[in-house]
Amino acid sequence: MRTKMTIFLVLLSLFVLCLAVNWYTLLKSKSDLWRKVAIFIALTIPILTPFFPQPRFSLDFFWWRVAGLIAIVMGQVIFFWAKNMFSGSEELFGDVPQEPITAGPFQFVRHPMYLGFIFIIVGWWWLWQAIYAFYFGLFIVALLWIQAYLEERLLLVPKFGDKYLGYRQQTGMFWIK
């Protein structure tokens, strides 16, 4: 059991390190390659967690799978709908756009790509019913909230000012106001 938890602590540490590398490269305008590697690893880690040995929830497996598939599909729709709102020159998790995006899913929530990713990850854990992966997921959701908060505070508010502050008051971070 101790080995299993150690694996998840290492994965969580790696996830946090990837977020830190992403922020460092973004704020210091350093190598784009490191940011892409960090984002790839950070997106891959949660997908791999259910495959490590761990206890499983003993609930009605069929309905958890159905709910998991529905959450995954909803997350993909939200994520790609939000991604399509960026112009062709913008990178996924890359530079801040020239104008705040307030159309499409951004009219409902400020961070629909993160919300879509959360739906995908939660659906994935429901699909596999992995207990440690679920706990790991709670940390990831908290870290994504911190990521979104820092993104707003350090990048979006300084760049867009009152325009973004007004948008922030009208729109929820992850949930519809």
Image (cartoon, grey):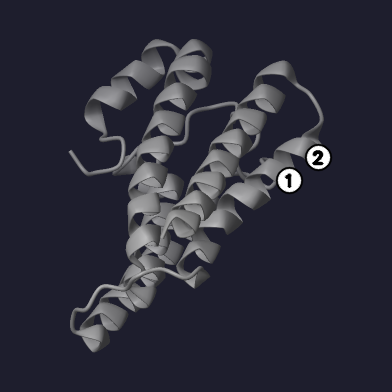
Q: Residue at x 48, y 29 (%)?
A: 100
Left or right: 114 in relation to 89: left
The answer to whether residue 84 is seen in the rendering is no
Q: Name the spot of residue 120 as percent of width and height, x first.
A: 41, 63
Q: Nearer the viewer, residue 58 or 94?
A: 58
Q: Residue at x 54, y 64 (%)?
A: 48
Binning the other alpha carbons within 10 Å of mark 2 as few (below 14), some (14 to 19) or many (20 upward) gives few
Q: Residue at x 37, y 35 (%)?
A: 145
Q: Nearer the viewer, residue 92 or 169?
A: 92
Q: Name the spot of residue 104 as percent of width and height, x first.
A: 40, 49
Q: Nearer the viewer, residue 130 or 92?
A: 130
Q: Name the spot of residue 157 as percent of width and height, x first.
A: 44, 15
Q: Which mark is residue 33?
A: 2
The answer to whether residue 31 is seen in the rendering is yes
Q: Which residue is mark 1?
A: 37
**Residue 91 image-quadrant placement:** top right
Binning the other alpha carbons within 10 Å of mark 1 as few (below 14), some (14 to 19) or many (20 upward) gives some
Mark 2 and mark 1 in contact? Answer it, CB < 8 Å.
yes
Q: Which mark is residue 174?
A: none
Q: Amino acid at mark 1?
A: Val
Seen in the picture, residue 103 relative to 56 is either above or below; the reply is above
Label 2: element kind: helix
Q: Residue at x 25, y 85 (%)?
A: 61
